[in-house]
Structures are given as C-alpha cells and as structure tokens.
Image: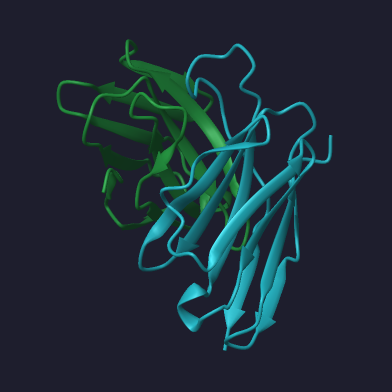
Chain colours: A green, B cyan
Amino acid sequence: SQQGEEDPQALSIQEGENATMNCSYKTSINNLQWYRQNSGRGLVHLILIRSNEREKHSGRLRVTLDTSKKSSSLLITASRAADTASYFCATDYNTDKLIFGTGTRLQVFP
Amino acid sequence: DAGVIQSPRHEVTEMGQEVTLRCKPISGHDYLFWYRQTMMRGLELLIYFNNNVPIDDSGMPEDRFSAKMPNASFSTLKIQPSEPRDSAVYFCASWPGQGLTLMSGELFFGEGSRLTVL
C-alpha cells in the first residue's frame, strides 16, 4: 500500500500548547497536503506544500517538508479546544489522485 | 456554491440488500473521487472520474461495488449485495482539475454517507 503513516496516532495537549504531527510517505511526490476532519464531518483542506518547498505557514499552522527523508510535519501553535479533530496528510505520488495517511487524533483540553 | 452534496447521510440496511449512495459535486469541477473510511483501514480511494469517465477503479474492493457518473453533476456508488464488512463512511470529493497541475489544489469533500449493514 502507498498509504502514508502518521505519528503519533493520538495526541492530547492543553490549550495554549503547540501540537506537532508527523507524516511519512513512500515514494516521490509533487505535492503534500494536510486535511482536518472534525468528528462526524467531511475532510477540510488546511494547507498544500509543493515538493520544491521546505516550509509553509498559514495562520497558526506551519508545515515542513523534507523530501530526502520523505516526511512532513504539521505544527499547530497556541492550540485551542476548537482544534480538536483528526489530521491527515495526503500525497499524490505523481498521479492525479490523493492517497491519505492514517491520521492523528488531536485532543485539546480547555 | 453549496459544496459537495451527498445522500443519504445515514443508511442502515440488512445484509444482501442493495445500497445506492449519491453525490453531487461542485459545479465546474472536472474530477470526482469516492473514498471509504473505516477505523481499520483509514481512508481508501475506491474510484475516481475525470469528465464523467472512470479513470482508476483499482480501489473498488469487489464486483459487488460499482460506480457511475452519468453527467457532470451526479454520481452514484452502488453496493449489491451489501455485506456487514461494507459498513463504513463513504465520502465523495471533487476537484476542479482544468489546467491545474496534478493534484495542485485541494479536494472538496462532502459530509459523507454512514452505511451500516446488519
């Protein structure tokens, strides 16, 4: 399977703390995306990073990409209870389809 | 735009029954994807269409599964006959395509159809 792996599977933190999630993938990619899924809802796109980019920011989100290690990380700074959700990375593997990772369940306690 | 619309949101059926899930993509989007989500296997890509044509159905688990896209605004995923192991949340997603490079933009997901087969 080409499915990426995410680490950790689950993460619990207090409001105000930073949350870091990691994603590893298997072969070369054009882009890597991060999505968020609230319980019982569909996935929502957060950020896209291209294979020639190393870091990208969007609000409280910071994404890094290391193509030599085939890994990416998502950092959420100053987390809020509303950030509680599952977070998935997705890679294209040089095709016109997205393959999703296994996800990280983030719980932010008030 | 109303986004990707899926129906039904919840379906409970008995083993052996036919199940039809429906999806209306965002107008103007050339690509439509069907995913299945379970605790055990995560998000699996089942099939995707480009301009109403199925491009890759390698993720369809068995012949019991079939998908169609008769026009740009409607797609169905059918399971016949259904089995308990088909219980999952089925997502439809669309993507504009149209001159964009491979998967250079976000997928827009529907809210999913939760299927329970008893």
A38 above or below B2? below
In the image as oriented, which residue stretches furthest toward the right?
B1
Quarter residue A24 falls in? top left
| Horizontal arrangement in the rendering, residue B1 relative to residue A3 (left or right) | right
| Horizontal arrangement in the rendering, residue B47 relative to residue A23 (left or right) | right
Where's residue B104, x and y in %? Answer: 50, 20
B21 above or below A55? below
A71 above or below B73? above
Give whichever of A53, A99 is nearer the camera: A99
Residue for point 50% across, 83% down: B84
Quarter residue B42 falls in? bottom left
B39 above or below B111? below
Where's residue B77, x and y in %? Answer: 64, 58
Residue for point 77% across, 26% down: B28
| Horizontal arrangement in the rendering, residue A44 relative to residue A13 (left or right) | right
Quarter residue B73 falls in? top right
Residue for point 63% across, 57% down: A41
Where's residue B6, x and y in %? Answer: 74, 55
Where's residue B79, x and y in %? Answer: 59, 69
In the image as oriented, which residue stretches furthest toward the left?
A69
Give whichever of B2, A63 is nearer the camera: B2
Count of labels in the image: 0
Residue for point 37% across, 34% down: A75
Give whichever of B11, B47 is nearer the camera: B47
